[in-house]
Image: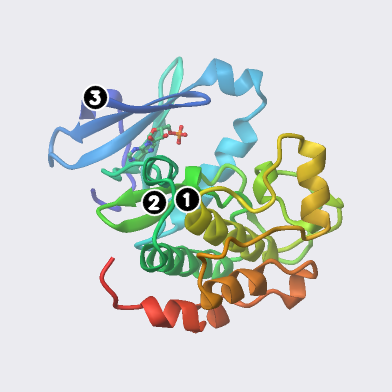
Amino acid sequence: MSNEPRIWTLQDFEIGKALGKGKFGHVYLAREKRTHYIVALKMLSKRQLLESRMERQLRREIEIQSHLKHPNILRLFGYFWDEKRIYLILEYAPNGELFNELRIERKFSEPKSANYIEQVINALMCLHENNIIHRDIKPENLLNSCGVIKISDFGWSVHAPTTRRKTLCGTLDYLPPEMVCREEYDEFIDHWALGVLTYEFLVGEPPFESREPRETYRRIEGLQYNVPSHISEEARDFISKLLKRNPYERMSLEEALEHPWLVKHRNSMV
Ligand code: AMP
């Protein structure tokens, strides 16, 4: 897919099988007719977007994702629209959501988790260097392309040049204490989510999960979680250095990359 800006239409693509359904429409496998390049075409209903007042969020998503070029960030090659729909031309990730992979395998081994987490850290480093906070890191927003993890879904991402923000967003299980307490927050919320993600990969469920949202909030605030005994000391330490109540005490992404748990599994077979 060329990087040159061009005007696309639906006629430029052969549409294949449905890859999945999101909140505002379907995603299809598609092939660009001229180059035969395979992409994922996300078709969003304008009416539904307007009804849910999501236009600004989509605009932000397009603005952010189209400028990011990193192996661990899903590419947005372009977009176009017709009367009824908005179409996003996305990089195709053949293995789909990590969420499904995790549900099928129930939990990931330590080498596999470490490998995936390292790739998520590399993506987050790129985002934070560009002053972008993802705000919604979770297995549903990570795609697998033949072992290469791609962060997707930038609907909740924000450019954060200077100010700290106060909007409550993201997914309950991944909310950091500063959001639960409606305090201001910054990019360190992604570090917290990385800790939650590591736990969920290794254990198969997120650390603060509960049937009652209020109970989840309470556990997050009180930093109440248990690590099962099969989890290694190094992994436990890795998680605990990210799940800190004080955002500024959380391990930096650079430190995370050099943490003994990741170093131990780097270059190991997955
Ligand atoms: P979404 O609207 O982003 O939640 O996407 C709905 C579903 O489509 C997801 O659950 C994935 O299974 C699939 N999907 C979305 N984007 C892609 C992609 N780039 N490559 C492969 N599958 C995708």
Residue in the foreground of this view, choosing between 161 and 142: 142
Residue under label 1: 65
Could you say where residue 43 lies in the image, as x and y percent from the top left? 40, 26
Q: Residue 137: image x %, image y %?
A: 56, 52
- The reply to whether callout 2 and callout 3 are in contact (CB within 8 Å) is no
Q: Is residue 201 above or below residue 49?
A: below
Residue wearing tag 3: 17
Dot 3 or dot 1, earlier in sequence = 3
The amino acid pointed to by label 3 is Lys
Q: Is residue 119 above or below residue 51?
A: below
Give neighbour class at mark 2: few <14, some 14-19, many 20+ (Cα, 10 Å). Answer: many
Q: Nearer the viewer, residue 10 or 141?
A: 141
Mark linked to residue 74: 2
Q: Do residues under tags 1 and 2 come within 8 Å of each other at their CB atoms?
A: yes
**Separation of residues labelled 3 and 1 (CA atoms):** 24 Å
Marks 2/3: CA distance?
Answer: 20 Å
In the displayed structure, 263 sits above or below 205; it is below
- Amino acid beneath label 2: Leu
Q: Secondary structure at mark 3?
A: strand
Q: Residue at x 37, y 76 (%)?
A: 265
Chain-order first, disc 2 or disc 3 = 3
* Quarter holding residue 268: bottom left
Residue at figure coordinates x 58%, y 60% from the top left? 228
Q: Secondary structure at mark 1?
A: helix
Residue located at (52% from left, 51% from top): 64
Q: Mark 2: is the Cβ under 8 angstroms from ligand 1?
A: yes
Within-10-Å neighbours for mark 1: few <14, some 14–19, many 20+: many
Instruction: Pinpoint residue 18: horizontal percent, then vertical percent.
Output: 30, 24
Specify how the rendered protein is coloured. Answer: rainbow
Label 2: element kind = loop
